[in-house]
Image: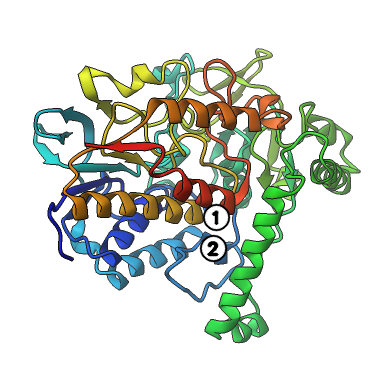
C-alpha cells in the first residue's frame, strides 16, 4: 500500500472484536498493529469463561466470524469448540504474531503535541500509537462480590468467570447466586455431581426453550458442503434481521413480544404444572424482554431435581459456613458460585482513558455512556470502540464487530492516503445521533425492567434495536459528515 503516513495501531483486547479488527486490518494491507491481551491466550470471554456448561446463545453459524467458515458440530457451539475456532482464526489470517498476551493496558492518554496515544501497561511500561481501538468487550469486567461476610466465609467463593481449575464438586453443598444466562448453563451442568444445590434468585427471568442440539449424521453430511453452509448462514442472518426490524420482540405490545411472552408462560406451565410453588416463584412480574431473555432447555428440568432447591430470595450475607438470605434463613454450603454478572453499563471500566485537555472518558460518561454510532466520542481523537455504547442486542455481535472493523479501516485508510494525523468526531453530530437513538428506545421493554442495559438516569446505554442493515448503513453514511480531520 502506497501511503503518505503510516499510522501505528493498538487494539486492546483479543476476543472476537479484537480478532475481527486485526483480521480486517491485515486484509486491508495494514501490518503495523498490535493486539494487547491481558489474558494468556486469545478469545476474551471464551478464554476466561471455563465454567461447566459454557456455550453460546446464538446459532453457531451466525456467531462465527463473517470471513471464516467452519463445520460446527452443534447448533449452538460450546466453549471448547469456540475456542478451537478462535485459535484457528489467528493462524488462518496470520495475526497471531501481532498478539501480545499477558499484557494488560490500564490507561490511555492522548498527547496533543505528538498526535498520539500513550498506553500505560501493568508493570509501568508506556507505549505510543497513533490509533487505539478498544475491544475490551461488554461482558468482561466482573462485578465485585460485595456481600457482608465475604471475608469470613471458609468455603470456596468465586465469580463464575473465574472458575477454579482444581474445583471438585462431588459430595459438595453448592450455592449458585444468580439466575441469568450463565447460571442457567452452570446449574444443569453441575447438578448431577453435587450433593445439594441452592439456586438464589433475586428476580425470575423470562426463559424460552433454546432448541440447541448436536448435529446428527444427516446434518453433518448436508453441512459438509460449503454452499449449504453459506445458504444456512444467509437464512439465519435474514431471519435475525427480520426479527430485529419488524415488530421486534423487545418492543412492548408488539406481536412478537406478546407471542414470546405466551411461549414463555406456556413453557413454565408445561414444566411446572405439577409444581405450583416453582411455577409461581419462576413467573416474572415485569414486561417480557425487560431484561436479557434466557434460552435453555435444561435449566427448568434441573430445578426439579431432588438435590436442587430454588431459593427465591436475594443473598443478605455470608457466614463462616453458609449463606443467609433476605428472609433471614441460613443454609450451610461448601461452595458459592457468584453468577452475578458484569459492569456492562460502565463501559471501559477496566481502562482509564484521558483525551484532549485532560478530559477523562469516565467523567464524560458520568451521566451515562454514549458514542457516535457506538464507536467514537468527541475530544478522544483516533480512539474507537468495538462493542461500544448502544451496539448490543440488535444483531449477532460478530456481525456488528465486522461492520465496526470496516469503519475503523476506512478511517485508517483515509489517514494513510491523505497524510491525516487526527480524526475526531463532531460534537453536534454525536448529539443529534444520540437524540435520535434514545428516541428509538421509547416503548421498548428495556426501559421497564431491572437490567444491565441502563445508565445512571435510566436511559438505555447498551442496546441497539434496529438490526444490522441499518447499523451498517449509518456507519458508512455518517462516517465523513460525523467526523473532522486534522
Q: Which residue is mark 2?
A: 77
Whole-percent x and y of residue 256?
A: 80, 46
**Relative side of 458 to 158, left or right:** right
**Residue at 79% of width from left, 26% of height from top?**
285
* Disc number for residue 171: none
Front-lying residue, 326 or 224: 224
Q: Quadrant of the N terminus?
A: bottom left
Count of number-bearing discs: 2
Q: Which mark is residue 56?
A: 1
Identify the colour scheme used.
rainbow
Quadrant for the C terminus, please.
Answer: top left
The residue closer to the viewer here, 228 or 336, is 228
Answer few, some or many: residues within 10 Å of disc 2's Cα (few below 14, many 20 plus, some between 14 and 19).
many
Residue 4, percent from left and from top: 12, 55
Task: Please report whichever mark, 1 or 2, sits nearer to the chain's N-terminal start.
Answer: 1
Crowd rating for badge 1 (residues with CA inside 10 Å; few <14, some 14–19, many 20+): some
Q: Relative to 115, is 53 on the left or the right?
A: right
> Gap between marks 1 and 2, in whole Å?
6 Å
The local secondary structure at tag 2 comes to loop
Classify 427 as above or below 414.
above
Residue nearest the viewer, comparing 329 with 427:
427
Which image quarter: residue 234? bottom right
Q: Please tell me which residue is depicted at 65% across the width and 15% down the height of the picture.
A: 326
**Residue 149 in view here:** yes
Which structural element holds mark 1?
A: loop
Residue found at x 41% / y 50%: 404
Q: Disc 1 vs disc 2: Cβ atoms closer than 8 Å?
A: yes
Of the pair 339 and 69, the residue shown nearer to us: 69
Q: Tell me what residue is drawn at x 43 percent, y 25 percent.
A: 428
Q: Position of residue 337 (x, y in %)?
A: 50, 35
Amino acid at each position: 500500500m502506497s501511503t503518505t503516513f503510516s499510522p501505528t495501531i493498538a487494539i486492546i483486547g483479543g476476543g472476537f472484536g479484537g480478532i475481527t479488527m486485526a483480521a480486517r486490518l491485515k486484509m486491508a494491507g495494514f501490518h503495523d498493529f498490535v493486539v494487547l491481551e491481558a489474558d494468556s491466550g486469545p478469545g476474551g470471554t471464551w478464554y476466561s469463561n471455563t465454567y461447566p456448561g459454557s456455550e453460546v446463545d446464538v446459532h453457531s453459524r451466525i456467531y462465527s466470524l463473517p470471513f471464516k467458515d467452519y463445520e460446527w458440530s452443534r447448533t449452538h457451539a460450546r466453549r471448547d469448540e469456540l475456542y478451537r475456532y478462535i485459535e484457528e482464526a489467528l493462524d488462518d489470517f496470520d495475526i497471531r504474531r501481532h498478539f501480545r498476551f499477558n499484557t494488560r493496558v490500564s490507561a490511555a492518554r492522548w498527547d496533543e503535541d505528538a498526535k498520539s496515544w500513550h498506553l500505560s501497561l501493568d508493570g509501568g511500561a508506556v507505549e505510543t500509537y497513533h490509533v487505539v481501538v478498544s475491544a475490551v468487550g461488554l461482558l468482561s469486567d466482573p462485578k465485585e462480590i460485595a456481600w457482608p461476610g465475604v471475608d469470613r466465609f471458609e468455603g470456596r467463593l468465586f465469580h463464575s468467570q473465574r472458575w477454579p481449575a482444581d474445583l471438585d464438586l462431588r459430595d459438595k453443598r453448592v450455592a449458585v447466586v444468580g439466575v441469568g444466562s450463565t447460571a442457567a448453563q452452570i446449574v444443569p451442568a453441575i447438578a448431577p455431581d453435587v450433593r445439594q444445590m441452592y439456586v438464589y434468585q433475586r428476580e425470575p427471568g423470562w426463559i424460552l426453550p433454546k432448541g440447541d442440539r448436536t448435529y446428527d449424521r444427516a446434518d453433518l453430511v448436508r453441512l459438509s458442503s460449503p454452499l449449504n453452509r453459506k445458504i444456512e448462514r444467509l437464512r439465519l442472518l435474514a431471519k435475525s434481521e427480520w426479527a430485529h426490524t419488524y415488530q421486534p420482540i423487545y418492543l412492548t405490545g408488539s406481536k412478537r413480544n406478546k407471542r414470546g411472552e405466551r411461549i414463555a408462560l406456556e413453557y413454565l406451565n408445561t414444566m411446572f404444572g405439577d409444581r405450583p410453588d416453582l411455577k409461581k416463584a419462576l413467573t416474572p412480574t415485569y414486561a417480557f424482554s425487560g431484561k436479557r431473555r434466557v434460552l435453555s432447555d435444561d435449566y427448568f428440568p434441573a430445578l426439579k431435581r431432588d438435590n436442587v432447591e430454588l431459593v427465591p430470595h436475594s443473598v443478605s450475607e455470608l457466614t463462616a459456613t453458609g449463606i443467609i438470605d433476605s428472609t433471614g434463613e441460613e443454609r450451610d454450603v461448601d461452595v458459592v458460585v457468584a453468577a452475578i454478572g458484569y459492569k456492562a453499563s460502565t463501559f471501559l471500566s477496566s481502562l482509564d482513558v484521558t483525551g484532549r485537555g485532560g478530559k477523562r472518558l469516565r467523567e464524560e460518561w458520568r451521566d451515562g455512556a454514549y458514542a457516535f454510532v457506538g464507536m467514537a466520542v468527541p475530544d478522544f481523537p483516533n480512539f474507537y470502540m468495538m462493542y461500544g455504547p448502544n451496539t448490543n442486542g440488535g444483531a449477532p455481535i460478530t456481525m456488528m464487530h465486522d461492520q465496526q472493523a470496516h469503519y475503523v479501516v476506512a478511517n485508517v485508510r483515509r489517514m494513510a492516503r491523505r497524510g491525516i494525523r487526527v480524526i475526531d468526531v463532531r460534537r453536534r453530530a454525536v448529539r443529534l445521533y444520540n437524540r435520535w437513538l434514545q428516541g428509538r428506545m421509547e416503548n421498548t421493554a428495556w426501559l421497564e425492567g431491572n437490567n444491565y442495559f441502563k445508565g445512571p438516569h435510566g436511559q438505555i446505554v447498551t442496546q441497539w434495536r434496529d438490526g444490522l442493515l441499518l447499523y451498517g448503513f449509518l456507519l458508512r453514511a455518517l462516517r465523513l459528515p460525523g467526523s473532522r480531520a486534522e
